[in-house]
Amino acid sequence: MRSKSSKQPKPLSTTANRVIPIKPYCLLSNFYDQLMWHVNYIFWSNYIYEVFKRSNVPNGIWCEGGCGSGNITIQLFRKGIAITGFDASEEMIQVARKKSNYQLNFEVESFHTFTFQNLAALFTVYDSMNYLLNITEVLKFFQRVYNALIPNGLFLFDLCTERNSLRNLNHWCEIQTYGDWTYWRHSWYNEENQIHYNDFEIIHSNDPTTVYVEKHMQKIYSIDEMIQTASQANFHILSVYSNTTFSRGSENDDRVHILARKLQ
C-alpha cells in the first residue's frame, strides 16, 4: 500500500517494545528484489549494453559499482560480457553471490575503497551515486573510476533529479509484507539541504514488537554539478541521456544518465 493521503499508514515503531537502528540494506537485503518488483532489469541491462556498444567500448572487463543484489550484472554476464561488481553492503553482496551460483566475482567494496583496475567500462545506476552526500566525495569517486579505467574506457552513471523528488517521492508512506518481513517506509525530500530521505521500519514475523530502522540518505545533485565534477576528474563528457533513452536529458527528466570517456 502506497499513500499520500491524510490517512497514511502508521509507523511500526508506534507499537514496538524495542527500536534498533541498523545500517542501510542490513535487513532490506532480505526482500530487496521483491521491493523492486517494478524494475525491468533485462530492459536496464539491454540499455547499458547498447549505450556502451554505440560508444565503441574497448575490449575488456566491465564493472558495476553499487551492484546491490546483482540483477543487472548477472543479466550482462548472460550476454557474454566479462563483468564484475561491488557494493558496500555485505548482505546485498551475499544475495548477489548466491543468485549467480557463485559464478561471478562480487566484492564488498564502497565507492571510496574499490580496488578494481584495468576496466574497459564502469557503470553505476539506479540512484546508487546519490548516496555520496557531498561533492568532494563525488570527485574522489570519479577520480578513482578514472584511474581504474584503461585508455578510452567508458563511465556511465545516473542521477535522480530534484524534479523526481518533488513530484513523485515527497512525503508518501507505504507498508508492505513480503514473506516473514514487513516494512513501513516514509520517503521525503528536504529542499534546503537537497537530501532525499527514505526511512524504513522493518519487523520479522517471529518478533513483531522489535522494529529495526534503516535510514537512507541520498543527495540530489544538478546535472551541471555532475558534468563539472566529472570534467574536473579529467573525463570527457560524451552524452547526457534522458531516462533510459538516447534523447538529450535535462532537469525536466526524473532521471538522467551521463556517459563519459577516459581519453588516452
Image (tube, rainbow, N blue to C red):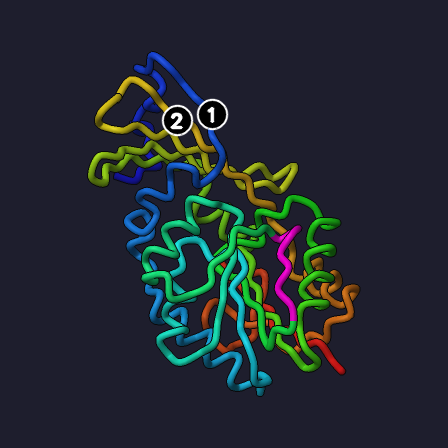
Q: On the rendered image, what quadrant is the C terminus found in?
A: bottom right
Residue 218, which numbered label?
Answer: none
Q: For residue 13: magenta?
A: no
Label 1, on which residue?
21
Question: Quarter of the image holding residue 141?
Answer: bottom right
Q: Residue at x 28, y 49 (%)?
A: 34
- Secondary structure, mark 1, is strand
Q: Nearer the viewer, residue 212 or 186?
A: 212
Q: Which residues are magenta?
A: 111-117
Which residue extends farthest top? 17
Q: For residue 115: magenta?
A: yes
Asked if residue 227 lies left or right of residue 23, the reply is right
Rendered view: 197 above or below 137: above
Residue 93 at x, y = what percent?
A: 43, 51
Q: On the rendered image, what quadrant is the N terminus found in?
A: top left
Q: Nearer the viewer, residue 167 or 209?
A: 209
- Secondary structure, mark 2, is strand
The answer to whether mark 1 and mark 2 are in CB contact below 8 A is: yes
Most frequent secondary structure within the magenta stretch: loop
Q: Residue at x 37, y 15 (%)?
A: 18
Q: Residues within 10 Å of mark 1 (few under 14, many from 20)?
A: few
Disc nearer the start of the sequence (1/2): 1
Label 2, on which residue?
212
How much space separates mark 1 and mark 2, taking CA atoms? 6 Å
What type is the residue that disc 1 sits on?
A: Pro
